[in-house]
Image: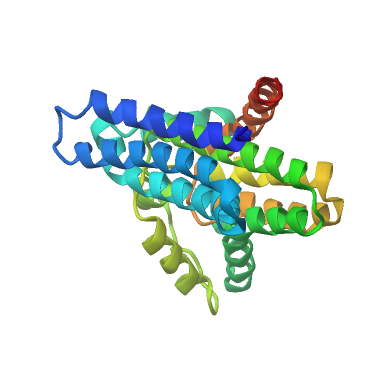
Amino acid sequence: MIAFKPSDGVTILFSLLFALIALLHIGNNSYIVNLFVLYLSFAFFQYCLILLSSKGKFFIICRDMIFPLVAVFSIFDSLTLLIPVVNPVDLDYMLIRADYYIFGLYPTVFFERFHHPLLSDVLQTLYSLYYFLPFVLGVSLKIKGKNEDFEECLALVLLCFYLSYIGYLIVPALGPRYVMEHLHGIPVMDGLFSGPLRMLLNAIEGIKRDAFPSGHTGVSLLLVILAWRHARFLVVPFSIITAGIIIATVYFRYHYAIDIIAGIILTVVTISTGKVYYLFTKKVTQR
């Protein structure tokens, strides 16, 4: 019998969901056909890896680590084309109003008083470490032979990423670094390497209209919680990095403050729905 894992289901379900979204908008732009095929191929390749994982360690590594990474970042990259077709009106103005209503000021403008080259270097470094947190947790669990814990973490992290993508489709927003530039009195004060690092990340991520919710906040907080559950020696460094990431999202004008709040809600939704989904899939596959 072929073992079906909860993470397999997350990738397949969301690949099919994005394929359906693309299918419903094919009439608007011809290149959406390519996205439709791309999303279907992810579901197909995930299913193939389920079948092939019994053939050796290479396919197991592809199934558990390589392909989830490829799918998550490829679908994220595809949002550059998908979001403007699905929801062409940017909603930054709503998020700006929400920030001012909640805080009585513009948080990114308020943070200007704290700008300093050294602080920029520290925060940009912490922000960049976000991309390594899932790998550190996953590898540590694999090394310790905690395969069941690894599978739970993988399923939840994938779920958090894909739920954030749905948020970008529903509430497309460029973010304050683009929309609120006229309100910022000074540019970000870069240090020795914060500027090049930020330029590199901008080049890699591109313009996705991915401000709401803050996926960096949602995924990072989720990883802290998962570290507390399964690898407590990582809790302190993960917590420090996550605090820096959250501050950096507003400091560098990547996000509105309301995006951070939405990111926290994203973590809660991921844990609550993910628990139900994980237990359900485990129960079904063990019959």
Q: Is residue 204 visible?
A: yes
* Relative to 286, 84 lies left or right: left
Give the image location of residue 246, x and y in percent: 63, 49
Give the image location of residue 196, x and y in percent: 46, 73
Q: Residue at x 66, y 56 (%)?
A: 133
Q: How many marks?
A: 0
Give the image location of residue 171, x and y in percent: 40, 30
* Relative to 211, 127 lies left or right: right
* The C terminus lies in quadrant: top right
Q: Residue at x 60, y 47 (%)?
A: 54
Q: Residue at x 35, y 41 (%)?
A: 41
Q: Please tell me which residue lies in front, 175 or 275.
A: 275
Q: Residue at x 58, y 39 (%)?
A: 260
Give the image location of residue 282, x and y in percent: 69, 26
Image vertical order of residue 245 relative to residue 31, above or below? below
Q: Is residue 88 visible?
A: no
Image vertical order of residue 121 relative to residue 230, above or below? below
